[in-house]
Amino acid sequence: MLFFSFFKTLIGKEIIVELKNDLCIRGVLDSVDQYLNIKLAKISVVDEDKYPHLLSVKNCFIRGSVVRYVQLPARDVNKELLQDSTRVEAREQKRK
Amino acid sequence: MASQMELSNPQAPEAGSGTVEEPLDLIRLSLNEVIYVKLRGDRELKGKLHAYDQHLNMVLGNCEETVTTREIDEETEEEIVKKSKRTLEMLFVRGDSVILVSPPMLVR
């Protein structure tokens, strides 16, 4: 549940989701779930000339499994907290 | 990395988070260090590991991505290898693309 909690802290922030089909979508993170499915608002396609125009699309739901990367603003990420949470998560996983 | 690692006795009752027993423990040792990640699609990443989970989802800081493409020249039939790089200040990587994780190779 680590990354689920992590993404919840980024709700309201602008991110870029890169899909496995190479499409990059910039938008504001609206919500996320345990599968890391993502809802984005106010979307725009990065590098519009190259990729399918989603000009009329304002909001979208992205299935978690099709995501390759999510580009995040470094200033909105607490690195120390992430590392500490990772150690806790790894310890819990080990006990299972 | 360390060439000899003490592996704890599998029969020992309580392992604790300090001992290295399974592969994921090796990754734990690389937290806050720069690592090399090989991904599907001829991609490689080098960045500082801030977080990971059992699926190998990760967050990398100051990350450099290298994409390798191979083209065959029609006339000469020779293989042209191209590498393109970009840097991203903070990147979440979904674990299902990950092939391997390692400390970065210092000398190629």
Image: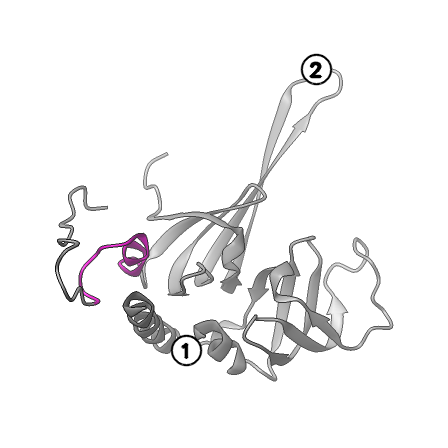
Number of other residues with Cα within 10 Å of mark 2, as a class: few under 14, some 14 to 19, many 20 or more: few
Residue B42 lies in quadrant = top right
Spot the residue most to the right: A56
Spot the residue most to the top: B76
The chain that hosts pointer 2 is: B
Residue assigned mark 2: B76
Q: Is residue A48 magenta?
A: no
Q: Tell whether B23 sits left or right of A15.
A: left
**What's the mark number on residue A78?**
1
**What's the mark number on residue B64?**
none
Q: Where is residue B3 in the image (x, y as percent from the top left)?
A: 18, 41
Q: Which residue is drawn at 51% across and 64% down?
A: B92
Q: Where is residue B66 in the image (x, y as percent from the top left)?
A: 53, 45
Q: Tell whether A9 sits left or right of B70.
A: left
The magenta region covers: B17-30
Q: Position of residue A4 (x, y in %)?
A: 50, 76
Number of other residues with Cα within 10 Å of mark 1, as a class: few under 14, some 14 to 19, many 20 or more: few
Residue type, mark 2 in image: Thr
Check the image and report above or below for A77 versus B99: below
Pick the front one: A17 or A39: A39
Same chain check for tags 2 and 1: no
